Amino acid sequence: MKAKRRDTKTRPPSERGPFLRVSASQRFRVPLITLLTDFGTADYFVAAVKGVILAGNPTANTANLVDITHDIPPGDIEAAAFTLLAACSPFPPGTIHVAVVDPGVGSARRPILIKLGKQFFIGPDNGIFSYVCESNESLGVRAEMFHLTNAEYFRDPVSATFHGRDVFAPVAAALSVGVKPVQLGTSISNIVRLSPLRQRTSADGRLLARIIHIDRFGNCVTNITQNDLTAKMIAAGATLRIKGKSVTSFRNYFAEEMTGKDRVFGIWGSAGFLEIAAANESAAKLLKARRGDAVIVSDLLGPRASRPQAR
C-alpha cells in the first residue's frame, strides 16, 4: 500500500519545515563578494574575513565568495589598485569588492565604501580605489563615496590591526543583505588618489607615460591606451623610449613571428594597456625596469592639442 502524499499546500506555515523555499531568481540575486588582500594564505587572516562575511550573510556560501588574490606584495597599494582595476569589470551588477591592503590600519585613515555604477568597493581610504574611480569617471560614471562611521555594523571589539575582519568584512555582509550605503556611513566628496593614469604630452608632441605595473612574467604594463597610441601611429613608426633603450617592434600576440630580432616589443595587454614584453623572458629584467619608470613615445602623427601640455 502506497503511503499517502502529504498535502503541503494546505498545511499552515507553522507546521511546515524550518527552511523557506528560495526561487532560482532570488538565489541569483545574492551578490558576489570578492576579496583582494596582501594577507597571503599561510596565516588565518583570509579565513577570519570569510568567517565574518558568512556569519553576517549565511546565504553567501563559498560559491559567492571569490578570491581575486591574496598575494599582493605587503603594503603595495599601487599593485592592489591596478589588480582591482584589471579584475573588477567582468563581475556582474551588485558585486561587492572588498580590497584590503592597509599599511595605515589603526591610524586616522578612513574606512570607506564606494558605489561605482552597479558595483561596490569597500576598503581603506589610501588610494587603493584610485584607478577604478578614475577609469569609471572617464566614462562618465559618478562615484558615490561614504565614510564608514556606523559602528553598529562593525565587529565588536574592533582590533586596531585587523580592520579587514572587524570593519570591512561585516560591512560587506551587511551590504549584501540589503543594508543601504547611507545606513553605513556619511557621504563624502573626495578620497585619497594615486598619481593619475592619464598621460601628458610634451610641447614637442611626445607622449609622456610611465610603467604602472610589472606582472609575474616581467611584462611592464604602461598607462598607454589605444586611444593614446593608435594603430595608425604605430604603423607610421611610433617609438617607445624606456631606460635609455628604444622599442620599435609591436606584436599582436606573444608567439607572432617578426622579421626583426628585437627581444623587447610592445603588445596590447588584456587590461587594455600597452605592455612592454619579451617572448619567454622578463622584459623588466632585460630593461632593468621598475614601476614608475618613464616611457616616452615619440614620432607620433601630428600635434595632439587635446591633451594637457607637460609643465
Image (tube, rainbow, N blue to C red):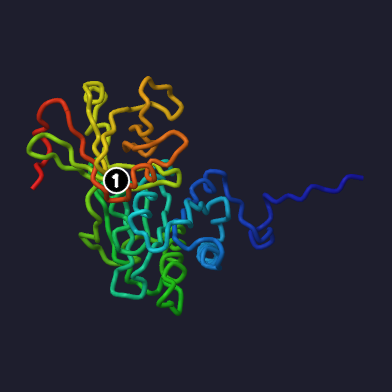
Q: What residue does disc 1 label?
A: 211
* Residue at x 21%, y 35% (from the top left corner): 297
Q: Report x, y in % for residue 79.
A: 37, 53
State the residue in front, 257 or 39. Answer: 257
Quick one: SS at disc 1? strand
* Residue at x 24%, y 41% (from the top left corner): 244
Choose top left, top right, bottom left or bottom right for residue 269. Answer: top left
User: Is the residue marked by circle 1 packed among few (<14), some (14-19), or many (20+) residues within 10 Å?
Assistant: many
Q: Amino acid at mark 1?
A: Ile
What quarter of the picture does the N terminus occupy? top right
- Looking at the image, the residue that sits furthest to the right is 1
Please give left or right for residue 128 compared with residue 203 in the image.
Answer: right
State the residue in front, 27 or 110. Answer: 110
* Residue at x 54%, y 61% (from the top left corner): 41
Q: Report x, y in % for residue 216.
A: 45, 47
* Residue at x 45%, y 65% (from the top left corner): 169
